[in-house]
Amino acid sequence: MKIISSWSGGKDSCLACFKAMQQSHEISCLLNFISEETKRGCFHGIDSKLMKAQSDAIGIPICQNEVSADMAEYEKEFKSAVLNLKKEDINGIVFGDIYLLEHTNWVDRVCGEIGIKPLEPLWNLKPENIANEFIDLGFKAIIVSAKADLFDDTFIGREFDKDAVRFLIEKKICPCGENGEFHTFVYDGPIFKKKIKITKTEKIFKDGFWKHWFLDLKEYYMEEK
Amino acid sequence: MKIISSWSGGKDSCLACFKAMQQSHEISCLLNFISEETKRGCFHGIDSKLMKAQSDAIGIPICQNEVSADMAEYEKEFKSAVLNLKKEDINGIVFGDIYLLEHTNWVDRVCGEIGIKPLEPLWNLKPENIANEFIDLGFKAIIVSAKADLFDDTFIGREFDKDAVRFLIEKKICPCGENGEFHTFVYDGPIFKKKIKITKTEKIFKDGFWKHWFLDLKEYYMEEK
């Protein structure tokens, strides 16, 4: 089946995409929503240029859609973007949801309403197993945001490796950060034809209702593999 | 110790208040934040008048604070309200958090910064046990809001009883709704001197980024016990 991959730049959407490819689906594009205000991913805060770099490194085109700050509009904008891509004979869309029922119910309802099949290859798997499988497969990611009431600034910029997974389990935090506890940026892995080498970063403290640590990926280059 | 009870109108803050009273703390007031725009509770959406009715029924004064829609201001407004009450020789504040680390970390940090002791009597208890204990103690509550991607409109207005708890567990939804899956309104119980009889309600569908079913409690009266 020809499908779209819902793409945030983080480990779960990347692993879901990989698993869909292993199930012989052809990924026609990575679908990504960015804020028209910040030009960054709506949920993970990753700069749109860096998600374009992932698309180039993987060799699958990315479809980036700017959306307004008004989250009430998001469902309409999501449907419109998917319907637009659906014209090109696409039948499915893969997501990286794990256990949040409200997310997957939203996906089921919205995809049902526009006649596209949702795939959820990570659904109901144990978060610890997902995290370790991602690492064992050779994917490489770094932590790019984290809630400041859960983490100090040393967690930001850290490699998402087995040590990080153990640290999260010890702290009783979901090792996949399914509740938005932290987000990652994937820079290499088995579906990457090139590797993204990050050379300059900056840690930023974002003060809102919930406080976040945030890693701005300022400079990078593409490395042949 | 003379303490404040953080109050949302729902079962967890009510049970936490009850447990603090059992530990011989004196509750000097219920502390509640309402939106200056809607005049309803910031998190549960309960009309401010109904929380005033709870305070009258229980016989503990309520301190209601209007806050702006800008949630970035909430921490400041919370601190200012607590510092104002603290002048009256209050040393602690009781919350109904169960397992969300980011909530309790926020509480610990913010209370630490203004020198008031946070009490968390429900912390780390099993949600199923909390729900059943609340019911076994004789508290009475109804479901007043629920995420529409998890529930249909028949869940709204339902009694929060053992059947509801079994239904939630079967659906694999937290029986306390700790992730905001649903909210309740407490209308009777062992700390209530009077009972709030709800006589007219209306079910409303709220369409935002997440869709909610919402029960507007339109008419009620106080019944002697």
Image (cartoon, coloured by chain):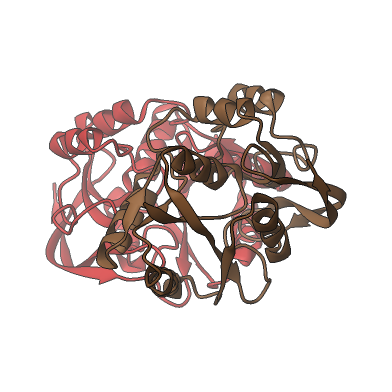
Chain colours: A brown, B red
Residue B166 in the image: above or below residue A220 = above
- Say if residue A81 shows up in the picture: yes
Determine whether, in the image, residue B89 is placed left or right of residue A97.
right
Q: Residue furthest right?
A: A200
Query: Which residue: 23% across, 38% down?
Result: B171
Q: Quadrant of residue A97?
A: top left
Nearer to me, A166 or B145:
A166
Residue A141 in the image: above or below residue B71 = above
Nearer to me, A120 or A215:
A120
Nearer to me, B143 or A83:
A83
Query: Which residue: 53% across, 72% down?
Result: B69
Nearer to me, B61 or A88:
A88
Q: Locate residue A202, reporting x and y percent.
A: 85, 53
Query: Which residue: 36% across, 63% down?
Result: B45
Residue B8 in the image: above or below residue B66 = above
Q: Locate residue A134, reporting x and y percent.
A: 58, 32
Determine whether, in the image, residue B151 is placed left or right of residue A200.
left
Residue B164 in the image: above or below residue B156 = above
Q: Locate residue B102, reporting x and y percent.
A: 58, 42
Determine whether, in the image, residue A183 is placed left or right of residue B212.
right
- Say if residue B55 shows up in the picture: no
- Tally of numbered tags: 0
Query: Which residue: 66% across, 47% down?
Result: B110
Q: Locate residue A74, reporting x and y percent.
A: 45, 70
Quadrant of the image containing the N terminus of chain B? top right
Q: Quadrant of residue A72?
A: bottom left
